[in-house]
Amino acid sequence: MPEPKRYLILAEGKSADPHYGKTARGIIRYASHPVVAILDSTRAGEREQGIPVVGTVDAALVFGPTTAVVGVATQGGRFPPAWRELLRSCIAAGLDVENGLHEFISEDPELSELARRHDVELRDLRKPPGGLSVPTGANLEVDATIVLTVGSDCAIGKKTVALELDLEARRRGLESVFVPTGQTGIAIAGWGIAVDAVVADFLAGAAERLVVEGAERGGRLLFVEGQGSIVHPMYSGVTLGLVHGSAPHAYVLCHLAGATEIEGCPGHPIPPLPELVELYERISLPRRPAKVACIALNTAPLQSDDEAREAIAAVSRETGLPTDDPVRFGAAHLLDSVLARPYAATR
Amino acid sequence: MPEPKRYLILAEGKSADPHYGKTARGIIRYASHPVVAILDSTRAGEREQGIPVVGTVDAALVFGPTTAVVGVATQGGRFPPAWRELLRSCIAAGLDVENGLHEFISEDPELSELARRHDVELRDLRKPPGGLSVPTGANLEVDATIVLTVGSDCAIGKKTVALELDLEARRRGLESVFVPTGQTGIAIAGWGIAVDAVVADFLAGAAERLVVEGAERGGRLLFVEGQGSIVHPMYSGVTLGLVHGSAPHAYVLCHLAGATEIEGCPGHPIPPLPELVELYERISLPRRPAKVACIALNTAPLQSDDEAREAIAAVSRETGLPTDDPVRFGAAHLLDSVLARPYAATR
């Protein structure tokens, strides 16, 4: 299992901005390693969710960080140029750096040389790993229960649902690992592969590598971040490669309350949920037939908790499956339904 | 007009292997330029379909080749390292090289420099074009009937069936175009995109571009070369991206007589054909529901024509669909069944 990390989140000038803070907040809420400080000189001395905000790298060192994380998501993923000095300070202070942006710090000659001298690691989380190939069958040998979040569309909460289920499982003392398959998930977890960025032929191979690594990281229960949708006219190939490569024992089907059409694709309907459940089950590997364990309904469009509960009850009646909104009402109910089945029998 | 090509197929150590010879045999049978020799030192002195097999590049030169083709398809598409010497010899002998593997010879500094010195061209057939993106919806506006060959497995004849149907349609005077989606099809037709080599996110976008170009090339009837299988544990993502991006009106389902398991993937069953028919139909774009028009049964494993006819009749009874082997008995029957439906209604 990897060394325990203690994060310093670099959020200079950004930590108050809800848009830029998405990755930072994800790390604070979901990462399995603690965040010991947040660096933002515009808010030095404050606290965010109990975590001290500091103004300089030096001021952060008293909290014992091991790893600085670039915790912003800028438009287009480029580095704010003023950050170079900040990165130099982190490296000089002996901190590893994890970067989720498109610009790779490991390919920067000056920062690489500085990192070499200070014996720290620069990790570009979005850089696809070398040596990808097709699956070897190791996905079917992983000694863990694999749960994949799938959906009726993109951007409806598949990553968040996987993170909430993983968090709830770890709260219960289970050896659970969140398996990241996209850039934000990778930044939150500090590892992973953005599967939509690999060569199409190696999609399933990349997904296989991720579940193998999830088990190596100590997971007996893996919550794999889903991508796209099997019925999405643009991204369904990524979805199916991930479905077959990660070889899940069970799905959690995510849906946005009230949605009937693929977002941004007018005229492309979302099939009724019972059909979608059956389609995901039918399309699973014949060698590893997976069932939808439950429905995660994103009720964010609904104002009141009462409306949300009604929508959840309606989907549960329609599909005959346990249904809940794990963000609004907690992940306990959905985790119970995931754990209710004896998956070992399907290995 | 470019010089007519004369192919030397590089099949070192592979030309007797039915799996690895797929690319070589496709070129021999369908390319509009002749194959003058096959290089395989393990079979030097033999003939394959009348074409001499030679042991060295020097021995091939007497047959006047202009272009060496890497005629193997290895698992995952990697270059056998011993082939570098062979490629050097071809380039030094003044031959252009066409390469269908994932490893791009045009990006190899040593081979590129050698090619420059000998004034030969290195063409990587799988190198994706620039400017790919997600589909725009143009696939649904193409003024042509789009037919996609799909299958129960890889390497069972999806490309061949599309080529045979296209040839038969053109014989009947129809404005038909074969749409190549893999390296062999590209080598045969002289255009196309190897969809398995594009970034996963752009799979459907690449497929869309191909059907748009097929119509621009004069096709009112497009036979799109299928890839992989929806139930293949390695390549299903490519299959589904192609299914949704090419937006077919109809499928021709290809199957190898007697096959019950995915080749090279022990323990991965092929579902019964009626289930597979339903699965392809269910997984088609809700906006463009496609039906399986007929079954193309590859009866190559069966010795006699009588056995083949029996197997065809059995599959037809099992599926309730017109069934034939277009290689063994001609493509007329299958083309009739493809043309029988009024596809325009589904646009």
Image (spheres, coloured by chain):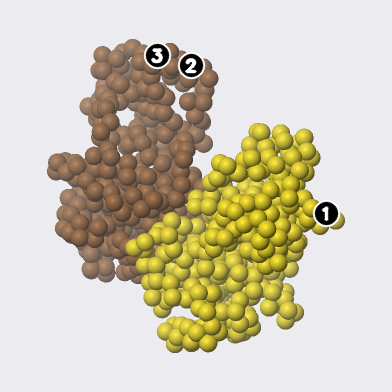
Chain colours: A brown, B yellow
Calculate the distance from the C-alpha at mark 1 to the C-alpha at mark 3: 58 Å
Whether residue A301 is situated above or below residue A14 in the rendered picture: below
Q: To which quarter of the image does residue B71 belong?
A: bottom right
Chain bearing tag 2 is A
Amino acid type, mark 3: His
Image quarter in which the N terminus of chain A is found? top left
Chain bearing tag 1 is B
Label 1: which residue?
A: B2
- Which numbered circle lies on residue A113? 2
Q: In this view, does B61 lie to the left or right of B320?
A: right
Image quarter in which the C terminus of chain A is found? bottom left
- Kindly report which numbered mark, 2 or 1, lies closer to the viewer in this rendering: 1
Q: How crowded is mark 1: few (under 14 residues within 10 Å), some or many (20 or more)?
A: few
Q: Is residue B125 visible?
A: no
Amino acid type, mark 1: Pro
x and y percent of residue B130 in the render? 64, 46
Calculate the distance from the C-alpha at mark 2 to the C-alpha at mark 1: 51 Å
Q: Can residue A296 be seen in this view?
A: yes
Calculate the distance from the C-alpha at mark 3 to the C-alpha at mark 2: 9 Å
Judge by depth and name the residue closer to the eye, B258 or B13.
Answer: B13
Q: Is residue A267 left or right of residue B64?
A: left
In the rendered image, the residue lying farthest to the front is B45
Label 3: which residue?
A: A118
